[in-house]
Image: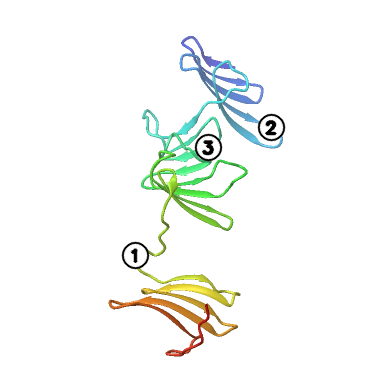
Amino acid sequence: MIIGGSDGDMAKHQHANFVFENAQNNGHVRFSNEVAANYIQSGYSGAINSAKDLRFGPVWTAKTWMAITKDGNVGIDTTKPANKLAITNPGDIGMLSNPTQGGIVIQDQEAYNRGAKLYIDAGEIQSVKDGRPNALYLNSFLGDVLIGGGNSDNTASHTGAAYIFHNATASGQIRFDRDATANYIQSGWETIPNSAKDLRF
């Protein structure tokens, strides 16, 4: 069954498929089903195995809530996602598109090669700005930073202005501190205030 068609716009039911086609805009949206799954397919009119961006939004406007590009990238509040998943406004979060690299990228601008990014992968965190390595700030608006702990006896922490390295098994603590008059390297016993322990170089 075919509805319309004289001006290039048509909708048709063909076998088990519903097809919406516009020859003037070269668009083709196909609703299909198979035993394993149902499909919404976007392509070009009259072109077999073609792919065209698919966008979701309110009717009679150019606003886009979500877009799926012809390459399979998904964008929320953006029509040109550079990563496998891009969420914009006010910030961006995306899954890295390199299948051998994996990981997550968080960026502050939609443009792929601009602004600051934070790459997070298994065992790796890298800060980048404008395509170059950048400083990584942890708790830049105050707050302690602890590295290690859990089932490990070895930890490092940043508390106030001091950097502290701990080892509970060896009962050791090395503290790097500073004040207005001097910088300090202090060696002592774990959890014992004002203690002193040999320091060897």
Q: Which amino acid type is shown beneath numbered disc 3?
A: Asn
Q: Which mark is residue 124?
A: none
Q: Which amino acid type is shown beneath numbered disc 1?
A: Phe
Relative image position of residue 129 (x, y in whole percent): 40, 47
Q: Nearer the viewer, mark 3 or mark 1?
A: 1
- Dot 1 corresponds to which residue? 141
Label 1's element? loop
Relative image position of residue 21 (x, y in whole percent): 52, 19
Label 2's element? loop
Q: For marks 3 and 1, give the CA distance.
A: 34 Å
Identify the residue at horizontal 53%, vertical 37% (top origin): 73
Label 3's element? loop
Q: Nearer the viewer, mark 3 or mark 2?
A: 3
Q: Which amino acid type is shown beneath numbered disc 2?
A: Glu
Q: Quadrant of residue 28?
A: top right
Q: Quadrant of residue 13?
A: top right
Identify the residue at horizontal 50%, vertical 17% (top origin): 26
Q: For marks 3 and 2, give the CA distance.
A: 24 Å
Q: Is residue 11 above or below residue 160?
A: above
Q: How are the residues colored?
A: rainbow
Nearest to N terminus: mark 2 or mark 1: 2
Nearest to N terminus: mark 3 or mark 2: 2
Relative image position of residue 194 (x, y in whole percent): 42, 90
Q: Quadrant of residue 110?
A: top left
All told, the count of numbered labels is: 3
Relative image position of residue 80 (x, y in whole percent): 45, 34
- Dot 3 corresponds to which residue? 73
Q: Is 46 positioned to the left or the right of 165 in the image?
A: right
Of residues 129 and 196, which is closer to you in this image?
196
